[in-house]
Amino acid sequence: MATVIDFEQKAVARLKQRVAEVEEANQDLIAFARGHSGAVSAIHAAALAAIDAEGLDHLIHVVTQLWPDILGLDAVSIALVAGDVGLRADLSGMQFVDPRLIERSISDIDSLVMRACDRGHPLFGPAADLIRAEALVRLENAPPLPTGVLALGQRRTQGFSTRHGSELLLFLAATLSRMMGRWLLD
């Protein structure tokens, strides 16, 4: 006598499992798309705020005071070197610093470094102890304009890790570099 094997129950269970996996992948993709869209909007808003600056001092204010809120970050600082002068600006104001510190920082960055850290880069100043994720972006300009580093930091360890995020940050740094040139050459 032949035995009938019931494949239906196993096939239905396997199909339900695959549908659940596809649904989870869909939700992950939707979450990524929403996050990416939000990041693009934030970068655009930051770039527009920089474009609206009425001078170099106002541009530095926008970067250090407004960008943290616009970009959802805990700290933003900018360090510039021109000739033998080094400047660092953050939430607490602007200070002269040894230009070699900035030049060393620039030499360590190809275009962009995004990383988790136990302590933020010294260019963050007093906020460095709080930073757990940082993005350091080179600011490129031809002499006599300053070169430098844009430092973006947050207390959470995740955040700066995608290729799309790096393209957005490079765009933001290029915008900032051009805006500095606009005010320094006029």
Image: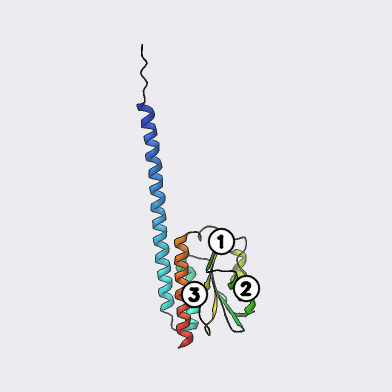
Secondary structure of residue under mark 1: strand
| Res 8 visible | yes
Label 1 Cα crowd, 10 Å radius (few <14 / some 14-19 / many 20+): some
Decide: marks 1, 2 in contact (CB < 8 A)? Answer: no
Residue at the spot 43% in from the left edge and 80% down from the top edge: 53
**Quadrant placement of the C terminus:** bottom left
Q: Which residue is mark 3?
A: 63
For marks 1 and 2, give the CA distance: 18 Å
Decide: marks 2, 3 in contact (CB < 8 A)? Answer: no
Which image quadrant is residue 24 in? top left
Q: Residue furthest toward the top? A: 1
Residue at the spot 58% in from the left edge and 73% down from the top edge: 106
Secondary structure of residue under mark 2: helix
Label 3 Cα crowd, 10 Å radius (few <14 / some 14-19 / many 20+): many
Q: Which mark is residue 104?
A: 2
**Looking at the picture, which amino acid does disc 1 mark?**
Arg
For marks 2 and 3, give the CA distance: 22 Å
Which of marks 3 and 2 precedes in the sequence?
A: 3
For marks 3 and 1, give the CA distance: 21 Å
Which of marks 2 and 1 precedes in the sequence?
A: 2
Residue at the spot 41% in from the left edge and 42% down from the top edge: 21
